[in-house]
Amino acid sequence: MGVVAKRSTMTFFSDAASHYSHRVRIVLAEKGVTVDIIDVDPNDLPEEVTELNPYNTLPTLVDRDLALYESKVMMEYLDERFPHPPLLPVYPVARGESRQFIYRIERDWCRMVDEILSNPGQKELDKARKDLRDSLLTIAPIFAEKPFFMNDEFTLVDCCLAPILWRLPQLGVALPQTRQSKPLLDYMQRLFERPSFQESLTEKERELRDQASVA
């Protein structure tokens, strides 16, 4: 087993196309963290990642002696390590609710996204696209009540949802311009115009929307 040299600055090994890496990059940008972001080919991981991460996965966050390899753990660690601006509510009940929202996003929408990106058969692909579209439209009205996901403030929940919404054109999911969908479309615009979101985008992620606008 090789010996990995300790880095003097925080390092984030990122998959430039993955929504799981993207959510952490949003948190890093929101916090204004000084970090060395290294885009890595998930099929050709550097030795440093394989030494530090027993699962050989991306993203991987390294902060001195600490190596984290689960995106939700990274997000909460960064929120505690850099408390301003806070991205989770202060009170335990509200924090619990936020964590539960993230859990549901992962169980429902992230699962659908991953299924679509895994290139299943056409029947499964059509079903996953329809399920994701219908699920998003079902919750669209809640965004008329508060500017962010069930909250007046931008939180880690939004950090998880924004990368999925940005990728809808890539996923082949089109939201109709209807009265029902308008609160969700307005929410998406608020997210995408946020400076931290713009800063978080990789070249590959910008190309996702550029290609969609040309198509």
Image: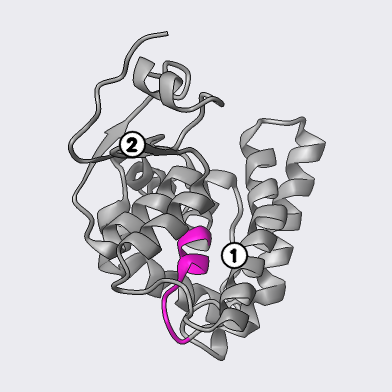
Can you see residue 179? no
Residue 33 horizontal side relative to residue 74, left or right: left
Q: Is residue 154 magenta?
A: yes
Can you see residue 51? yes
Residue 55: x and y in percent read 56, 26
Residue 53 horizontal side relative to residue 196, left or right: right
> Quick check: 176 above or below 9?
below
Identify the image quadrant of the N terminus.
top left
Residue 5: x and y in percent read 25, 22
* Amino acid tagged 1: Leu
Residue 184 horizontal side relative to residue 66, left or right: right
Bin the neighbour count of mark 2 within 10 Å (Cα to Cα): few under 14, some 14-19, many 20 and up: few
User: Viewer-proximal residue, 131 or 7?
Assistant: 7
**Between tags 2 and 1, which lies in front?**
2
* Amino acid tagged 2: Asp
Identify the image quadrant of the C terminus.
top left
User: Viewer-proximal residue, 57 or 163?
Assistant: 57
Between the C-alphas of marks 2 and 1, the distance is 44 Å
Image: magenta residue range: 152-160
> Quick check: 83 above or below 72?
below
Residue that carries the numbered disc 2 in the rendered image: 65
Label 2 or label 1, whichever comes before in sequence order? 2
Residue 91: x and y in percent read 53, 84
Q: Which residue is drawn at 33% across and 36% down?
A: 65
User: Tag on residue 175?
Assistant: 1
Residue 161: x and y in percent read 53, 62
